[in-house]
Image (spheres, grey):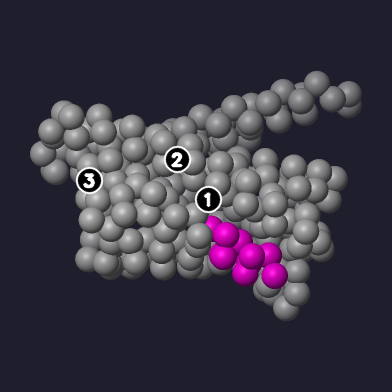
């Protein structure tokens, strides 16, 4: 996986917007590309702030190059889960953290909440990855799913893009060497993964090892500090609600 990630990073550096489009499309369709989408969004926005894509249309082009694959990939994944890929989702989902219980919970949410639940699910770290396949498995109509996909994806990308762009501007003003910037990025990711794993273990109240599927989801979410904060706040709220329920 580390070799694949290195190849993908080289591809990003060499082909720019085209690489971002292809990798985001593969991820949104459901391929487990080992580069977190959050990291691509934040990094692309920061690069746009630094002027790297000015000749290709600037930040608007970067935003659309990420947003369009989110729409296309979401529609493809939804259609597959709703039709010929139903059995495949259940069979493969457990390897990336999408257990039957997790999918069932997401399916119940979108059945009850419709478009609003799809929108909220797609903007919530830790829930987003299950929302699209769950919508297909729940047999939502396209008319219900599509507005949620558009609104949720646009909002999710929007606040990631804003964070990345502002961060990129700040780093550009500081004029830090590339090696320092790379070290900062690696430190944020490493601390995020460590903090996420510790928090999840404590919240579960268990000392057992985290499975490969959950580890994949942690890696995907830990690239964005804001995502960690949102997911842990949501998780704490769920634990509080469960503890208040009568036995």
3 or 1: mark nearer the eye: 3
Which residues lie in the magenta part? 70-79
Which residue in the structure is indicated by mark 3? Answer: 51
Residue 93 can be seen, yes or no: yes
Q: Main secondary structure of the magenta part?
A: helix
Q: Is the residue marked by circle 2 packed among few (<14), some (14-19), or many (20+) residues within 10 Å?
A: many
Q: Picture coordinates of residue 46 (x, y %)? A: 30, 42
Task: Indicate which disc, 2 or 1, sits on the residue closer to the N terminus.
Answer: 2
In the picture of the structure, the residue carrying the numbered disc 2 is: 160
Question: In which quadrant is the C terminus drawn?
Answer: top right
Which residue: 31% across, 54% down? 57
* Residue 205 visible (yes or no): no
Find residue 132 and report its horizontal and vertical position in percent.
66, 57
- Residue at 85% across, 45% down: 112
**Which corner quadrant of the image does residue 19 belong to?**
bottom left
CA gap, disc 2 to disc 1?
A: 18 Å
């Amino acid at each position: 996986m580390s070799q694949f990630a290195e190849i993908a990073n080289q591809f990003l550096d060499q082909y720019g917007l085209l690489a971002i489009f292809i990798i985001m499309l593969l991820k949104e369709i459901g391929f487990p590309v080992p580069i977190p989408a959050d990291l691509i969004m934040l990094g692309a926005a920061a690069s746009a702030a630094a002027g790297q894509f000015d000749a290709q249309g600037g930040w608007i082009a970067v935003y659309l190059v990420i947003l369009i694959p989110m729409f296309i990939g979401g529609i493809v994944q939804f259609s597959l889960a709703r039709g010929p890929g139903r059995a495949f989702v259940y069979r493969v989902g457990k390897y990336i953290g999408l257990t039957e219980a997790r999918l069932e919970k997401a399916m119940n949410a979108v059945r009850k909440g419709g478009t609003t639940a799809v929108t909220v699910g797609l903007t919530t770290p830790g829930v987003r990855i299950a929302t699209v396949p769950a919508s297909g498995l729940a047999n939502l109509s396209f008319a219900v799913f599509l507005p949620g996909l558009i609104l949720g994806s646009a909002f999710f990308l929007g606040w990631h893009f804003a964070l990345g762009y502002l961060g990129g501007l700040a780093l550009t003003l500081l004029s830090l060497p590339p090696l320092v910037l790379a070290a900062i990025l690696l430190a944020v990711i490493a601390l995020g993964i460590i903090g996420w794993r510790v928090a999840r273990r404590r919240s579960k109240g268990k000392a057992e090892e985290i499975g490969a599927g959950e580890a994949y989801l942690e890696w995907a979410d830990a690239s964005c500090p804001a995502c960690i904060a949102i997911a842990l706040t949501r998780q704490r709220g769920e634990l509080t609600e469960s503890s208040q329920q009568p036995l």
